[in-house]
Amino acid sequence: MANIFIPPRWRIPEALTTPESHVQNRRMFMRIMGYCGAGALAAGWLLRPQGSPDASELMGRSAGPLGPDCLSNAPFSPAVRNPGFAVDRLMTTDKVAARYNNFYEFTATKSDVWRLVGKFKPWPWQIEIAGLVEHPGIYDVEDLLRGLPQEERVYYFRCVERWAMVVPWTGVPLAALVQKLRPLSGARYLALTSFADEQQMPGLSSQDWYPWPYHEALTIEEATNELSLLATGIFGRALPKQHGAPIRLVCPWKYGFKNLKSLARIEFTEKKPNTFWNTLAPDEYDFYGNVNPFVPHPRWSQAEDTLIGTGEKLPTRLFNGYAAEVAHLYPDAPTTPQPRRG
Ligand SMILES: Nc1nc2c(c(=O)[nH]1)N[C@H]1C(S)=C(S)[C@@H](COP(=O)(O)O)O[C@H]1N2
Ligand SMILES: [Mo]
């Protein structure tokens, strides 16, 4: 009993432990596809050469949210979907997701981000590793990710503004990178910083009241939770620029604002770092940013999600449906309705 080793789910393509809320969907997936079907699907992704035409090009369109201005390349490579991470909701389409974005470095208008990313050059790309870690330095993103396990996961994603989507991300578990970098014993947080260049990102100078560059942070326990992903792709191809090319954070139990895009720097710290939205409006956005239907935003209820694309309304779930994986990190999280503050 004492010595049973349960490997983290990102180490094994077939999950041994699947959260209750995902079990039914996974069974259904298996029933429909069978293992052979799932294998063939995966092989299809693997065999598709990088840079092959995407759907919009095949339809004879060169512009649009998945057109050449929006596409990026490195360091993505296609990976097999891990069926241990599934969502019991209909998938959002790639085009809907690619033209409804929050990326304030370009504009605060969600429907216009994809139109403004043409000058953004997310390659070649370097990431600085700093602070309390054995291997600080400035690395090419390919070198940083080399040897780490890549996989695809379908996650439910929910913005603090209440819109939500269901999308497949490709990436590496952040835990695997943290392990590779070897934090020192004093390290308690990861401070993450986005790329920022006024020449490439028109929103930086037009909204100069924001505390650029965009910055976020996680505790080490959050960063090494099996759900935390550094995504390099979405919908089986490299991240379009508007989704945070070439690499961005995805922590699906947290509101969208924690999911920092176009990652340029990671610092391991002992002290709790400041974060962009918490600095701007501490009463509205706390450090953790965990999805919780029982804690209203001061200006709106957080009890309901609206799926982009379909407009379907769904009850918001505690930790966005990922309580099985993360609830133990937050023993004090409210689980009954709280009065609105502010
Ligand atoms: N650098 C940066 N990262 C960011 C943001 C941003 O404005 N700048 N917006 C955040 C918010 S509020 C959300 S909801 C998600 C949106 O991700 P998506 O556009 O890929 O759906 O990105 C997050 N990451
Ligand atoms: Mo958001």
Image: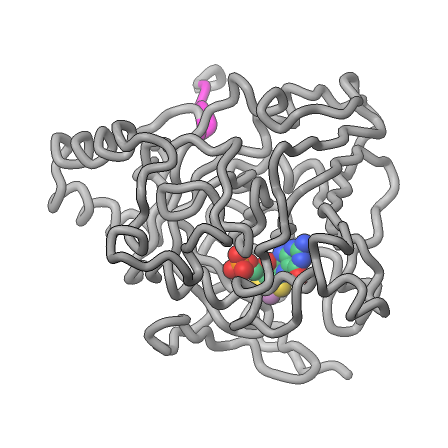
Is 223 contained in the magenta span?
no
Between 6 and 71, the one nearer to me in the picture: 71
From the image, which quarter does the N terminus lie in? Answer: top left
Q: At which x and y percent is residue 232?
A: 51, 39
Q: Is residue 52 above or below residue 262?
A: above
Q: At which x and y percent is residue 59?
A: 24, 57
Q: How many marks?
A: 0
Q: At which x and y percent is residue 224?
A: 61, 34
Between 44 and 31, the one nearer to me in the picture: 44
Is 8 contained in the magenta span?
yes
The answer to whether residue 143 is left or right of residue 207 is left
Q: Is residue 265 above or below residue 46?
A: below
Between 80 and 240, the one nearer to me in the picture: 240
Magenta extent: 5-10
The answer to whether residue 341 is left or right of residue 50 is right
Q: At which x and y percent is residue 303?
A: 51, 77
Q: Give me the residue at 19% from left, 46% from top.
A: 29
